[in-house]
Amino acid sequence: MLALDIRNVTKAYPGFQIKDVSFQLEQGYIMGFIGANGAGKTTTIKSIMNMTRIDSGEIFVMGKSIATHEMALKQEIGCAFGDVGFYTRSKIKTLTAVTKTFYPNWNDGAYYTYLRRFKLDENKKIAELSTGMRVKYSLALALSHGAKLLVLDEPTSGLDPVSRDDLLDLFRELVLDGEFSILFSTHITSDLEKCADYITFIDKGRIVASSDKHEFVESYRLVGGRVDQLPELKTRLIAYKTNTFGFTGLMHAADCDPSLDLKVTTPSLEEIMVYFAKKEEAHG
């Protein structure tokens, strides 16, 4: 079953749009949603939550349209944003008391388990929490009402390395039963290396690729050669950079000719993102 099915979603703003965005997430898996700042990750996530009205396209969660089953589906979706804002003068327990009234399936046992796991004191005011602790509180809320799909925008933002590692371990635990699914955006590629099953890459509002993580990485090649080889290679390169020793560039694996005198390696996720950000240099 598909936990999430996004079909040809378009949303335009002055000066920016996401265009024909389509991808699918199978139930029981974790998908990392990557792209540079401003690529369209947050707009896509807000569209999934129906927090912004799309211009065209369809979004299905657990086989049901978010447009026609919004209230029922929001019981099935846990959502958290890295930069979430709260009523900072309120205590955690006060905000939780209000939040739980919106969820018939609220589970106090699960909630207090996550409070303990995240070392959150419910008598603290939001203003007393660090950015990372606010993210953890958002997650505690998102995980306490029986959701089957977790949609997270930059959830590891503001977390120290140990807390981030603990959170990624939790993600892996959550999907073990095959019923729970997670979509999370991030610019921290090491997070994806550790826990993502699938990668969806958005660039300038359009989906570049959506596939198994290993297949995604293997579909690109990092190549190195002499500067005098550039003229014949420029049309194949997604992007490149030069140095005193020659050049390095990114290309699709299908465009990599073994007969060329090049040093060829498989890039990391981070290298793929960096070169896409530089692609104007190849074709500017």
Image (cartoon, helix red, strand yellow):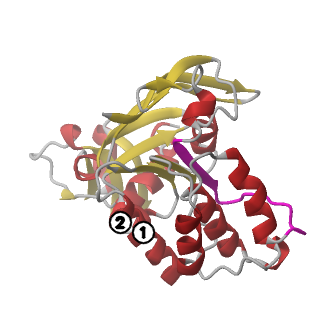
Q: Quadrant of residue 99?
A: bottom right
Q: Left or right of 238: which side holds 122?
A: right
Bin the neighbour count of mark 2 within 10 Å (Cα to Cα): few under 14, some 14-19, many 20 and up: few
Residue 173's tag is 2
Q: Residue at x 54, y 23 (%)?
A: 9
User: Does residue 57 appear anywhere in the picture?
Assistant: yes
Residue 247 % position (x, y)? 35, 58
Q: Residue at x 63, y 60 (%)?
A: 141
Q: Residue at x 22, y 38 (%)?
A: 255
Residue 170's tag is 1
Q: Residue at x 29, y 50 (%)?
A: 178
* Magenta region: 76-90
Residue 110 % position (x, y)? 52, 65
Q: Left or right of 163: which side holds 55?
A: right
For residue 190: magenta?
A: no
Identify the residue at the far top of this view.
Answer: 56
